[in-house]
Image (cartoon, rainbow, N blue to C red):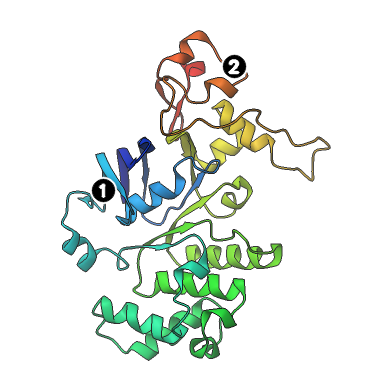
Amino acid sequence: MSYISVNDLKTQYKTQTGIVHAVDGVSFFLEKGESIGIAGESACGKSTLGLSLMRALQGGIVVSGDILLDGKSIIKMSESEFTKNYRWKEISMVFQGAMNSLDPVFTVEHQFHEILKQHNYTGDFDKRIAEIITSVGLNNSVLKKFPHELSGGMKQRIVIAMALLLNPKFVIADEPTTALDVLVQAQVISLLKKLKKEGLSIMLITHDLAIISEIAEKIGVMYGGKMIEFGSSSEIYKDPKHPYTQGLLQSIPSLKENKKPQYIRGNPPTLLNPPQGCRFYDRCPHAMEKCKKDPPKIKTDSGYVQCWLYE
């Protein structure tokens, strides 16, 4: 049995203009110690997928499907059971935008204490906080500071430390390098690689496939609310099946090959009223008439691809 198994998950938001099909039939699995990168354009459902796993949706609801963590459904269990036994203890999240995750009127130390208190931690608060701060490469002096006194890289490391405070086995990192300069991005990626070597499983949500290559054994490519390709990193990088995945990889500049990056023409579909059939149909260079019908899920060596080309 897989450590994490997401089965045909559908998450929706009700808005004044209609229902947003943010995550529409997503499936994937991970074994213990494995990490996954979730890639795709903005508004394709990546963050909603992460929030669904954390049961932290604001205004959204999981309408069908299931999420199994170590064989137990975290969708079917009560909120109190999930909070007591799983949230922040088994599964935690580094939310997008570090500054928005920190309270500007309290010191970093106070916010660490609040997390431990809320989750009924029974150990020595100060000792645990000192350990976790050191593990992310920061000095204890940051604990007495307010968020506005810290650099972007420091704040991002503190948010990561908060996610690790109660020793979870699985951490969701939502765009952890967004809005950081290249040097700090490299430091954050290096930190995530270090944590992974220590046994942590990571779900890295990003639009940058190059970053995923450094961390994850598996990749899920999302488009229009669906996971259109899933498999091992080696298979997807060497032999991408879906035309959208191929387009994403062709958009990455290469230092080895003397060719210009390509871009994908057109715009992604609206998730308010998604089109029937393959959602990449209007932008696909291989589009056929039957692509107007829902594509089949074709098994690959390490996962699957949803595309009529491989029927």
Residue 135 vs residue 184: left or right?
A: left
Q: How many marks?
A: 2
Q: Residue furthest top?
A: 289
Q: In the picture shown, does residue 265 fall above or below 126? A: above
**Residue at 57% of width from left, 46% of height from top?**
207
Q: In the picture shown, does residue 8 fall above or below 75? A: above
Query: Mark 2: few, some, or many residues within 10 Å (few <14, many ≥20)?
Result: few
Q: Position of residue 273 (x, y in %)?
A: 41, 28
Q: Is residue 250 visible?
A: yes
> Which comes before the other along the chain, label 1 or label 2?
1
Q: Quadrant of the C terminus?
A: top left
In this figure, which residue is indicated by the disc labeled 1? 68
Q: Position of residue 50 (x, y in %)?
A: 39, 51
Q: Residue furthest front?
A: 16
Residue 286: give its label. 2
**Nearest the eye: 156 or 198:** 156
Q: Amino acid at mark 2?
A: His
**Residue at 39% of width from left, 81% of height from top?**
112
Q: Position of residue 36 (x, y in %)?
A: 46, 49
